[in-house]
Image (cartoon, rainbow, N blue to C red):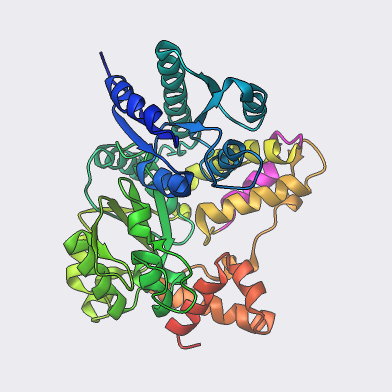
């Protein structure tokens, strides 16, 4: 018999836990059983079950009137994709029905029939797997027909099945995060977490706490234990974006953790092993930074087992209109608009633009056009380009860093130092903007 799915059981009755500990491993690949819902959320984060069998009533845990409904809401708010089967006494069937209305997959009445329990949990687990596969399909990338993108597609499909570290390079907006997601979704780790970190938004004080975690009381404001990104990504993929922005002192800390394959939380002495697949991305030229002594060579080789470089959209002109139509379909559905096409003038306008913001700029442009259009066709006048993004196009031998610095300085001049507006216009977070201001001594 083939065993499938991972099951987490939460029940405070020792006899029930003992019975299920003997029964469930015969049918499921992995089973975890806990007695208290206090550790339910952290256990789900670590174990990532396909289904949870949740008792409806625990002793002295909450004053909500019914613990099962409370913890069901907690699970569904944080892990919408995980199916929950409620475990209830006959007297609480009405509450179980209410639980179904709130998102529970099904319920089982105690005392239970083994066959019904197993069948229900198998259906709950398999439904989650099916939803995961459909999610991969829904998030598929439009690869286009260019030889460069088809070659990248072949590389992604080959590398996804391995645990090789991947470095994704390319200008802002080329879709580095999409490639990282695709690598994860096509891998055997797809049912485990995909944790993305914008390293440009982490300063020296936040880095260790966010990446490695901390224990309660280790510093002012540490009111509880906190698992860092390495632990959160356990069994899955850790995506480190803007890695070129990481200062040298933090690069050494990151390298040490990658070499040891273990983290120690701030204020703790316990070394915690982790199992992750590492993907990094940057719009900077790491080789130049290594030569200047601004990026560690040993870290560069650690993250650069496989290199994927995404070409800018201006070098993939044949993909502009197909991508535009793809975004039109996406946003007409989202905003309930009746837009189906582009006028010939609008197509010409799109093809003649430089797209310094790449696919992200095109996507934002089409979203605005769909919202602003008044008929079934997007006209040329509906298409508005960002002056900031247009002005940041690379010219001559200008590096990406030079382009980025110039764009920030132009935005500062134009918007009078209003950092909130500047961050929004440049389509970056405020912490990332602060980091870049510091980087360029602005």
In the rendered view, would you say 193 is above or below 111? below
In the rendered view, would you say 399 is above or below 92? below
Q: How many labels does the image show?
A: 0
Highlighted magenta segment, given as a residue range:
337-353
Q: Which residue is at 46% across, 47% downward?
A: 41
Give the percent coordinates (x, y) of residue 393: 51, 67
Q: In this view, does 300 lie to the left or right of 328?
A: left
In the rendered view, would you say 402 is above or below 140? below
Say which of 87 and 15 sits in front: 15
Quadrant assignment, res 336: top right
Say which of 219 and 319 sits in front: 219
Say which of 371 and 195 sits in front: 195
Question: Could you tell me which quadrant the N terminus lies in?
Answer: top left
Q: Which residue lies furthest to the right in this view?
A: 374
User: Is residue 37 in sight in this rendering?
Assistant: yes
Whether 343 is among the magenta residues is yes
In the rendered view, would you say 119 is above or below 67? above
Give the percent coordinates (x, y) of residue 307: 26, 54
Whether 102 is among the magenta residues is no
User: Is residue 168 in sight in this rendering?
Assistant: no
Give the percent coordinates (x, y) of residue 54: 49, 33
Say which of 380 and 251 sits in front: 251
Q: In this view, does 123 lie to the left or right of 169?
A: right
Q: Which residue is at 40% across, 14% downward?
A: 114
Quadrant assignment, res 196: bottom left
């Amino acid at each position: 018999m083939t065993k499938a799915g991972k099951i987490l059981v939460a029940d405070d009755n020792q006899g029930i836990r003992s019975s299920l500990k003997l029964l469930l491993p015969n049918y499921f690949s992995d089973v975890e059983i806990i007695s208290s819902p206090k550790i339910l959320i952290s256990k789900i984060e670590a174990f990532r079950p396909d289904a949870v069998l949740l008792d409806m009533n625990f002793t002295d845990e909450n004053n909500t009137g019914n613990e099962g409904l409370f913890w069901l809401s907690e699970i569904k708010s944080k892990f919408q994709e995980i199916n929950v089967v409620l475990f209830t006494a006959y007297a609480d069937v009405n509450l179980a029905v209410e639980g179904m209305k709130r998102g529970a997959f099904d319920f089982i009445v105690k005392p239970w029939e083994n066959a019904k329990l197993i069948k229900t949990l198998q259906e709950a687990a398999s439904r989650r797997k099916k939803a995961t596969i459909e999610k991969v399909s829904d998030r598929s990338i439009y690869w286009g027909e260019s030889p460069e993108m088809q070659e990248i597609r072949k590389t992604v499909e080959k590398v996804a099945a391995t645990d090789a570290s991947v470095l994704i390079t390319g200008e802002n907006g080329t879709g580095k995060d999409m490639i990282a997601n695709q690598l994860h979704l096509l891998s055997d780790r797809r049912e485990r977490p995909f944790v993305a970190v914008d390293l440009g938004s982490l300063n020296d004080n936040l880095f260790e706490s966010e990446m490695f975690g901390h224990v309660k009381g280790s510093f002012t404001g540490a009111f509880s234990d906190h698992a860092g990104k390495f632990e959160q990504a356990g069994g899955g993929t850790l995506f480190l974006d803007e890695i070129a922005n990481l200062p040298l002192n933090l690069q050494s800390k990151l390298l040490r953790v990658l070499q040891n394959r273990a983290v120690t939380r701030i204020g703790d002495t316990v070394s915690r092993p982790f199992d992750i697949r590492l993907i990094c991305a940057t719009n900077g030229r790491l080789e130049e930074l290594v030569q200047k002594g601004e990026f560690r060579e040993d870290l560069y080789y650690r993250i650069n087992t496989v290199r994927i470089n995404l070409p800018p959209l201006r070098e993939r002109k044949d993909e502009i209109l197909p991508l535009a139509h793809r975004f039109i379909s996406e946003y007409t559905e989202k905003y309930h608009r009746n837009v189906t096409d582009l006028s010939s003038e609008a197509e010409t306008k799109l093809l003649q633009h430089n797209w310094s913001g790449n696919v992200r700029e095109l996507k934002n442009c089409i979203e605005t056009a769909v919202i602003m259009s008044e008929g079934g066709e997007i006209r040329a006048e509906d298409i508005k380009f960002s002056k900031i993004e247009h002005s940041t196009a690379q010219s001559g031998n200008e590096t990406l860093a030079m382009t980025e610095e110039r764009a920030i300085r132009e935005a500062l001049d134009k918007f009078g130092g209003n950092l909130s507006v500047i961050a929004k216009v440049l389509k970056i977070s405020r912490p990332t903007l602060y980091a870049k201001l510091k980087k360029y001594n602005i």
